[in-house]
Image (cartoon, rainbow, N blue to C red):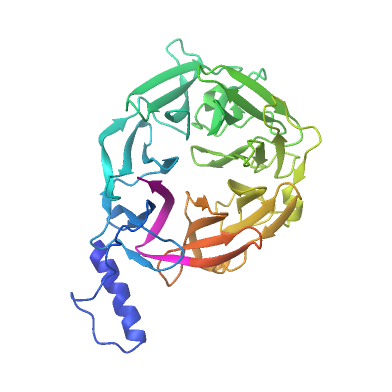
Amino acid sequence: MNKRNIFLSAACAISSLFAFSSCDDETSVPEPPVVTEPFQYVIVATSEDGTYILQTNDISSGQISIVGNGIETEAATAWIFYGTQYAYDLVYRQGDPAQVAAYELGADGKLKKRLNTYQMPSRYTTYGYFDNYITTAVSVTRADNTPGLSFNLLDVKTQSITEKVIAAGNFTGNGETANLSGILEVGDKFFTGICTTPAVNAGGTTGTATAYPDSVWVGIFDRDLNCTLLRDNRLSYATGRYRSGYHTNLAKDDNDNVYVFSSAYDNRTTKPSGALRIKKGETRFDPDYFFDIQSLAGGRHLFKVWHITGDYFLLQMYNTPNQTAEAVWSVLAVVDVAKKTYREVSGLPALDKIASVGSTPYAGDGKIAVPIVSDNEYPHLYIIDPATATAAKGLEVIAEGITAVGKLTY
């Protein structure tokens, strides 16, 4: 079904409810927004037959459509917003090298694609950015048949790509191979969670699990990829796992204190789903900070985390308590890491009505906008106020799904 038919079918259904006349090709659609601000919100929307990048001045209300609007792009597995300058899409190609495209606002405030499309030297299982680089990483086997970590570094200024491979065998000293989870820029370095696995499982290629599910490791890398290792035994590894992906469970507050969240994904761990802290400038876990989130969440484990503002973070939680086997994460909750409070967000569709939660929300102006697809209506952005843990329905997108939202300036 093409994108126009998607709109028309739904428009007919809505019309019939209000006894409007029959639908035809003259059914109106929202006009593309006129740029009126020195910034634009960017929404990545999907239909059965394509992925479209849309722009708008406001996400708190209103309606926007993929019909006759936006830029069509290849379906991406991940989106990275490099500040407010560029939006990068990462296309995962199973075992093949990843493809990347970039978008920006022109002098007229309208979205445009940067000239180059980039092919990374290798596939990826985690990603992020630091300094001038869009960065992907994956566990590999080096030429000498030993485990390695491949970093693909895309320079946003020169638009050149460099691959660097470092040794990954016995990376933490426990005899296992390192798999990285997320790239979190902090000052002139980046932090990453480390999930170790036997060498045969580099990159998640087998079902063999770590022999050390009750340890959490964090790596602090400098520009030359020298790594400082931090370990603690109060949590399990800081990784959100889904298929071959290693999703970041690290986030920083406004003062560059890093919070290390653990989903307690491994069902053999004796540790809860919770958080530890690394204070700004420190190279150790704060021994006085421990946040048991799972006990406050009625047994639910966290899957992903995003910083909102101040001490507030948004958690995406597994629906079913005390397990991580079922990959359903429709519960959203706000935690205050200073007060160690947990509140599930109200004002969202009922859990059994939520079909999906977008992978890339946008935090700004003290709130966070989260894409949600629910039954019997078009996707919406829900604007969450962390102070009250309440959500308000924002922009409606005439499409089948929303995967990402961000903000660019020009």
- Residue 233 belongs to the span the image colors magenta: no
In the image shown, does 186 or 316 lie closer to the viewer? 186
Residue 100: quarter of image = top left
Q: Give the x, y percent position of residue 364.
A: 52, 52
Q: Give yes or no for residue 408 being in the magenta stretch.
A: yes
Task: Indicate the position of residue 322 as horizontal and vertical percent values.
Answer: 69, 52
Q: Quarter of the image for the N terminus: give it.
A: bottom left
- 392 lies left or right of 66: right
Residue 403 vs 173, above or below: the answer is below
Q: Nearer the viewer, residue 175 or 292?
A: 292
Q: Nearer the viewer, residue 407 or 242?
A: 407
Q: How many marks?
A: 0
Q: Is residue 70 visible?
A: yes
Residue 263 at x, y = what percent?
Answer: 65, 43
Nearer-the-camera pick, 167 or 384: 384
Q: Is residue 291 above or below residue 182?
A: below
Give the answer, above or below, for where 135 lies relative to 341.
above
Which residue is depicted at the point 28% across and 53% down?
50
Residue 12 lies, in percent from the top left, at: 29, 79
Q: Main secondary structure of the magenta part?
A: strand
Quarter of the image that includes the C terminus: top left
Query: Which residue is at the far top?
Result: 144
Q: Residue at x 49, y 41 (%)?
A: 243
Q: Residue furthest right?
A: 288
Left or right: residue 271 compared with residue 378: right
Query: What residue sits 71% from the left and 55% below the top?
Result: 342
Residue 133 lies left or right of residue 398; in this view the side is: right
For the question of whether residue 1 can be seen, the reply is no
Q: Give the extent of the magenta segment.
A: 394-410
Residue occupying the far left of the picture: 25
